Image (cartoon, rainbow, N blue to C red):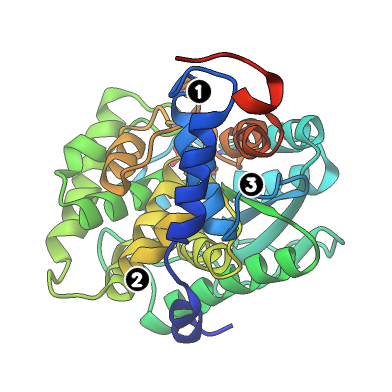
Amino acid sequence: MQLSSTIAGIGPLDADAMAAARARQANLTKPPGSLGELEELGVRLAGLAGRCPPPVPTRPAVAVFAGDHGVYAQGVTPWPQEVTVQMVANFLAGGAVINVFARQAGAEVVVVDVGVAGDLDPHPALRSHKIRRGTRDLSVEAALTRDEALAAIEVGIATAVDLVDAGADCLLTGDMGIANTTAAAALVAAFTGSAPARVTGRGTGIDDDTLARKTAVVEAALGRLDRSADPVGVLAEVGGLEHAALAGFVLGGALRRVPVILDGVIADAGALVATALCADAAGALVAGHRSAEPGGRVALDHLGLVPLLDLGLRLGEGSGAVLAQPLVAAAARVLGEVATFDSAGVARK
Ligand SMILES: Cc1cc2ncn([C@H]3O[C@H](COP(=O)(O)O)[C@@H](O)[C@H]3O)c2cc1C
Ligand SMILES: O=C(O)c1cccnc1
């Protein structure tokens, strides 16, 4: 599905449904505001669905977008690049953390190859949309051409639309790609204007020397960036194929008006791209958790999102999004099922 027509189809949250949800929150048998962030989340879910009470999402689907990174060559991660392809096989075999958490939450898992450097055997849960075998090295040249970035965005849009049209009512972001926290840091710096040192973190667990090298790599990429570039131009210069696909996934979810629960820093970076392309896409976003990666916090602040969980997670794969999904369902369910003061005969002054 095309980016331009997708953006044109995304509208704002429904103000009437949100007003109805706020009024209803005030009449439910609880002190006003006592459910904290879940109350505002319920209001936003009503605005997204265009009705109050909003539907309770019961069929979550997580899409794990996988790709490799040319910047791996700069020594920014302690893990071998083959781990990307090996972990994709692990996802398909059902043995990774995301599979375990998805079984716990009753979520479907699909894996989307947008740019894994190695070959993958066909599998029913694998969608093969390889755009190229890994990006170019973002520290020395543009990671992607504009056409490659656009193609990856459109894979993400199509994945979201396809999952929703097949019955999913809540989309969860996932990622796999060794070295992808470097590209995520570069995107967060570019879209928020933050210094690379503030948004570059230890990823899978790097020592001080590697962190210094990783930060210098992000600085080099940012130094090359044309400040007048549009969001797709910025994405192509310093991003990754999975970040691009995640941006499209957010847009596709917003188009279909279902909540999109963000996982960690890779998804947060993708959401920055998506909202730069279409501000109204922000209405579909739910921050599943706050990643331990510093760029995650900066991105969520920029997006104005309050994370539902803050567990020090730094895995990716979609793990934090899947853990947060029951909270999103609970926020919707409250509006439909909690008794009102009148219906339950509970007094208030
Ligand atoms: C075994 C393993 C499983 C993972 N699952 C997610 N990631 C996460 O770590 C990677 C990013 O970190 P960095 O930028 O430091 O390489 C991504 O693949 C991300 O999804 C994993 C990483 C490893 C090693
Ligand atoms: O925030 C994340 O999703 C994350 C952090 C570190 C490594 N991989 C993913």
Q: Residue at x 42, y 31 (%)?
A: 290
Q: Which mark is residue 35?
A: 1
Viewer can see residue 43: yes
- The CA distance from mark 2 to mark 3 is 30 Å
Q: Amino acid at mark 1?
A: Leu
Q: Quadrant of residue 214?
A: top left
Work out whether 183 lies above or below 33: below
Q: In this figure, which residue is indicated by the disc labeled 3?
A: 53
Image quadrant occupied by the N terminus:
bottom right
Q: Is mark 1 within 8 Å of ligand 2?
A: no
- Residue 35 at x, y percent in the picture: 50, 23
Q: Amino acid at mark 3?
A: Pro
Q: Nearer the viewer, residue 45 or 243?
A: 45
- Residue 188 at x, y percent in the picture: 28, 50
Work out whether 307 lies above or below 249: above
- The CA distance from mark 1 to mark 3 is 16 Å
- Residue 125 at x, y percent in the picture: 82, 58
Q: In this figure, which residue is indicated by the disc labeled 2?
A: 277
Q: Give the mark, 2 or 3, whose residue is nearer the N terminus.
A: 3
Label 1 near label 2: C-beta < 8 Å? no
Q: Is residue 194 left or right of residue 30?
A: left
Q: Nearer the viewer, residue 220 or 190?
A: 190
Look at the numbered disc 3 and give the secondary structure of its residue. loop
Q: Amino acid at mark 2?
A: Leu
Q: Give the mark, 2 or 1, whose residue is nearer the N terminus.
A: 1
Q: Is residue 289 left or right of residue 183?
A: right
Q: Nearer the viewer, residue 240 or 324?
A: 324
Work out whether 272 lies above or below 211: below
Q: Residue at x 60, y 23 (%)?
A: 341
State the count of labels: 3
